[in-house]
Amino acid sequence: MKKIMELGRRSFMKGVGLSALATAAGSTGANALGQSGGMSGGKGYDFDEVFVRQNSRKWIAAYNAYGKDNIDVAMGTADLDFKELPQVVEAMKQRAEYENYGYEPTPDSFYQSIIDWNRERYGQEVKKEWIRTSSALKPGMVSSMRGLNPYKGKVILLTPTYSGFRGAINKAGMRVEMSPMKRVNNRWTFDLEDLKNRLDYETKCVVLCNPNNPSGEFWSAEEMMGLGDVCIDHGATVLSDEIHCDFPNKGVKFIPYASLGEKYANTSITYRSPSKTFGQACLRVAYFFTQNEDLMNATMIGGGHEEGVNTFGVLAAETAFREGAQWIDDLNVYMNERFDYIVDYVNRPGEMPGVEFQKPDGLYLAWFDCNGLKEKVARPEQVRALHDKWRDEGNHRRVTPEMCMQEWIARNARIHLQPGSSYGIGAEGFMRMNIGVPHALLKKALDNWNAALKSLG
Ligand SMILES: Cc1ncc(COP(=O)(O)O)c(C=O)c1O
C-alpha cells in the first residue's frame, strides 16, 4: 500500500514543471507560459494579466460593504490576485484524478521541501523533528500562547502590527497588551523601555511580526537582538511570525529571528506558511518550529495543538517550495517596481494631496500616511456623523478616524483599503493598501484616489 501511495505521489510531483509549461505553451503561446512581456522586469512569469478572482474574500468583502457596482479595486485582505504557479495547478490536477481521498500521512518529502527552502533562501538549518504543521498560521500560535501561559495573563504586541493577532490572543483566553513602537526617520522600531515596563510576571509571550505587517520593516539583527534580550531577561518567549518573509524588496535581506544565535533560537518559536508566498491561503497549510523541545511540548501538549493539513495543501506547498523559487523572485521584482511606481506617483508635485508614502523594505502592502487627508475627511464631527449614520442603520461598530477615511475613500475613489486603526496603537492616520494586484489595477486605484483627493480642493 505504502509503495503504491509513494508511486502515486511521485507521479504528481514528477516532471510537473515541464509538463505544465509545455501544456501552457502549446495552448496559447508565450504569455500563457508566463513569459514576462513588458513591464514586469522579471525573468519568467507574467504578473500583468488581470485575473478576476470571483471567489475572493477580499473582493467579496468590498462588494458586500459598498455594492459590486461601486468598487473598482478591492485592496484589503493580504492575498495575491495572480494566477497560481502552473506547476502547482498541474500537480493538484494529477492528484485529483487519483480517485481516493482517504487518510494519508504527511510525507517526509514535504518536510524536506521546507528544510531545503529555508536552507537555500536563508541559510537557516531547520531539523525535521523541530517542525509541526497547522491548518493556518494563527492556530499554531494560539496553541503556543495557551501552552506557555496556563494561568492566562497577557500577550504583548508591538504595534502597529497585524490585526489578527488580537483575535488569536483572545482565542487563547488571554489579554492583549500593546507596546506602541517608536517612529524614527519614517520607520517604526521597538520601544524597548516601554516593553520593559510592560513585561511583568504574567507575560509569557511577546509576538514579533518579522517582517512587520502593515508597515513593512524587515527588522535588523540589532533591533531583534535588543528585543530578544529584553524578552529573555523577563522570561518571555518570542513568537516570531515570519509569514511575509519571502517578500523582500530589492537589496533587502530577511533575517530569521531564530538565526540570531543559540539563545534567541532557544527562547522562540517561528511560524511560517506558504499561504502568503504562493497565494495558497485556502489550501490550509502552515508550519512552525523551534529547537527547544520544552517550548514545543508546551504548544503540543499544554496548548493541545492539533496538527491538521490537507493533502492538496501539502502537495501545493511542496511543489511550490521545490519549483517556485523563480516565481517568487520574479514577483518580488514586480512588487519592487510597483513600490517605486507608487513613490514616484505620490511625490509628483500636486498629485495625491494629503497622502505621503515611503517605500517599505518589502511585503506587498503599501502603508500610506494619510494624516493630511484625515484633517479633511475624518475630523471629529465627521467621525461622529458616520457613527450616528451607522447607529441608525443598526450597525454598532466602533468608528475610528481611519474607518471614516476608509469609508470616504471607498465612496469617492471606489477602492477598498484597510484602516490603520485595525493594526493597533500608533497607526493613527494611516491606511493600508494591498498592492498584490496587476499593474493595471494598481494604476486604476491610484488614479481614482488621486482624482478624489484633488476634488477636495
Ligand atoms: C502577519 C500575518 N500573520 C498571520 C496571518 C494570517 O495567517 P493565517 O490565515 O494562516 O492564520 C496574516 C494574514 O494576513 C498576516 O499578515
Image (cartoon, rainbow, N blue to C red):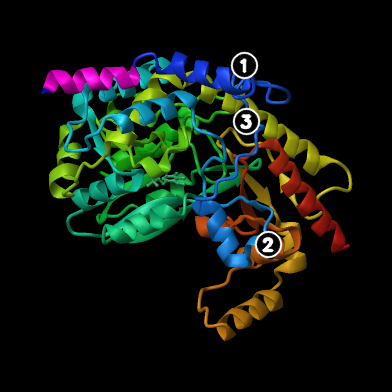
Q: Mark 3 belongs to which amino acid?
A: Phe
Are the two marked residues, 3 and 2, in contact with CB atoms closer than 8 angstroms? Answer: no
Residue 260 in sight in this render: no
Indicate if the residue with disc 2 has its beta carbon within 8 Å of ligand 1.
no
Tell me the quarter of the image containing the N terminus.
top left
Q: Residue at x 30, y 41 (%)?
A: 233
Q: In x, y percent, where is residue 258?
A: 34, 28
Return the disc, 3 or 2, that comes first in the chain's sequence. Answer: 3
Q: Is residue 297 magenta?
A: no
Q: Is 360 or 38 nearer to us in this picture?
A: 38
What residue would you read off at disc 3? 47
**Marks 1/2: CA distance?**
36 Å
Q: Is 345 or 54 nearer to us in this picture?
A: 54
Q: Mark 1 belongs to which amino acid?
A: Lys
Q: Residue at x 45, y 52 (%)?
A: 194
Q: Residue at x 70, y 68 (%)?
A: 378
Question: Where does the magenta region start and end?
Answer: 2-13
What residue would you read off at disc 2? 69
Secondary structure mostly taken by the magenta-highlighted segment of the chain: helix
